[in-house]
Image: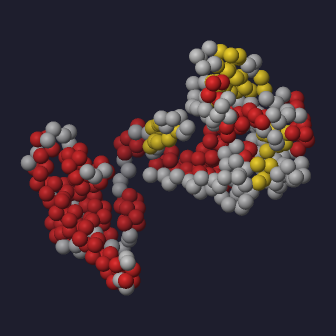
Amino acid sequence: MDVLAEVPTEELRLQLDADERVIARARARQAARIGELERRQAAAAAGCVSTVEWVSGRLDVAPETAQRLVATARALVSLPHLTGSVSHGEVTWDRTVEVAKGATADDELDVLLSSYEHDIAGFRRLRARKRRMTRGDERRAHAERYLAFQPALDETSVRLSGVLSGAMGKELQAAVDARADEFPPFPDGTRAPVSQRRADALVSLVTDSAGTGGGEAPAVIVNVDAADATPSNGESGVALVSGPRIGPDALEAILCDAVVEVTATAGDGSPLGVGRRSRTIPPRLRRHVLARDDGCTVAGCVSTYRLEVHHRVPFSEGGRTDPDNLTTLCWYHHHVAIHGHGFTIDPQSPRGRLRLRPPEAARPPPRIAP
């Protein structure tokens, strides 16, 4: 039997508090020892570039943890009151780290006492508001901006990372959140997590700025390795030129309404055939469908954002490119609900009031950002 299950709730709470005091005392001892070892130049003797690098490797902790330990150890040398408080477990280690960032020997007690009026997050915000922002700080933040794209090894996804100045970041977040708030729930009434809606919103905004708004279809060149694609039903052997591998969902989205050029190759790499670049849906027919439907045809949707033409029976499954098999969808229902999450059109629903059916397989759980 689980021993904890027999412990009264209040006793568990007290034990949890005691554990935090133990952690604080242990971190304080580590900080003191790190300070002394740095004075003895232990990192240099071990061939390390910095004390942070040495602590990270020695203690097997993340670089950011080592950074906090070393920075706080250096600050505590001149903060005797704070050092005594954390050494006796009277102050948590996290509060010690935050107080040490801005306290001096002259005001450490005042800063510590004022910090108790806030939780850790609130104290950080208070300290940030009081910190001076010089022109140099602003220009440094601007100079350090970057955006990086890191494709996965199997090219099925791309990880974005970056840093923006505070003002640029706030502006981007406001634009992304505003667009994400415009997206409706899924047809089953659920909503994607905010992190996924932000990803959809970012792609939506970029698509607008790239000049492909207003329903204009992109030009796409697809390479198909017949030897792999045929037996796998398109799950392998399909890739965009100078781009990632794609699977059946992405291929259906591309073939739905795009300017496409397909190059098929044999197993030895020799071309089996090069398709003429052509639009999946001819412009004249496309204009007819958009005019006929006069908006997104999903029941209840009033969006007119990036209206696009969709094959009710997928083009990749032999669906014909004629008016009876074509319908108008907004960008969200087309790319996110249908081609992204696998919803399908109920064939029994009226043409101008389409109902979407959930995918046969449940949507995968969202990945939690690290």
- Residue 208, how many percent across, how many down? 68, 38
As rendered, which of 197 and 98 lies closer to the eye?
197
Q: Nearer the viewer, residue 236 or 217?
A: 236
Q: Residue furthest left?
A: 40
Q: Could one spot residue 292 in this view of the protein? A: yes
Q: Residue at x 52, y 52 (%)?
A: 367
Q: Is residue 290 above or below residue 117?
A: above
| Residue 58: percent from left, percent from top | 20, 49
Q: Position of residue 33 (x, y in %)?
A: 13, 57
Q: In the figure, 59 relative to 23: above or below? A: above
Question: Observer-nearest residue: 169 or 167?
Answer: 169
275 vs 37, left or right, is right
The answer to whether residue 112 of the structure is visible from this angle is no
State the residue at coordinates (90%, 37%).
Answer: 323
* Residue at image point 37% right, 62% down: 124
Instruction: Please give left or right for residue 328 compared with residue 237 in the image.
Output: right
Q: Is residue 24 above or below residue 5?
A: above
Q: What is the x, y in percent for residue 219?
A: 70, 27
- Classify residue 81 by image quadrant: bottom left
Residue placed furthest toward the top: 270
